[in-house]
Image: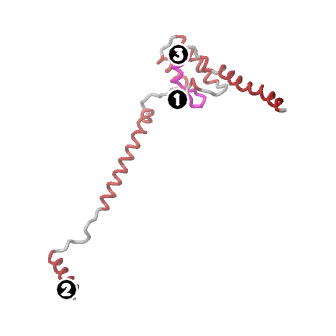
Amino acid sequence: MISRISRCRFPSALLVPSALLLALAASPALGQQTERAKRLGAKLMCVCGCNQILTACNHVGCTYSHTMLKELDLRTARGDSDDVILQSFVQEYGPTVLVDPPKKGFTGLVWILPILVPLLALYLVGELVRRWRERARLVPAGTPLSSELLDRARREAESKTDE
């Protein structure tokens, strides 16, 4: 009985690894011919919505990454420069296709804000604490007493304690 169960599971145990190997062989990232195409593909994002680098898009049947990788291979085979290839992808798919967007305009602000906002917040908190401390200092209440009034109060207090 035990040998019958193990014989039934053996073919399914081989099916899973073979299916994985088949999926890896059909992966569009393996279709790239040159190291240059792989390097350029790492600078581009897949536009299918997965938010992954083009060479790392692992969606089964992703037509975007397959098409983009073929296009990248063709342009590198033609001998286009890296800047021309990247610029052509930006013109076709928009600036979101770049992994590292240019640091000008609104995207420049996106690079600066994560540094600027915490520094501004720290300054404002420090200023708030400084103002609270100033307000908390003890200030004499009312008008200051003359030395004559202080002497008179001491004499009256001494006379009352002597009684």
The residue at 53%/24% (across/down) is 44
The residue at 30%/58% (across/down) is 134
Q: How far is disc 3 from disc 1 in space, using C-alphas?
A: 23 Å
Q: Residues within 10 Å of mark 3 (few under 14, many from 20)?
A: few
Question: Residue 77's x, y, as percent?
Answer: 55, 11
118 is higher (above) or lower (below) than 4: below
Instruction: Residue lying at the far front in this picture: please name it.
Output: 2
110 is higher (above) or lower (below) than 127: above
Q: Is residue 142 magenta?
A: no
Q: Which mark is on residue 96?
A: 1
The residue under label 2 is: 159
SS state under label 1? helix
Closer to the camera in the image, 158 or 116: 158
Q: Amino acid at mark 2?
A: Ser
Q: Is residue 41 magenta?
A: yes
Q: Nearer the viewer, mark 3 or mark 2?
A: 2
Q: Amino acid at mark 3?
A: Glu
The residue at 48%/17% (across/down) is 82
Question: Residue 59's x, y, as percent?
Answer: 64, 28
The residue under label 3 is: 35
Q: Which residues are magenta?
A: 35-52
154 left or right, relative to 34: left
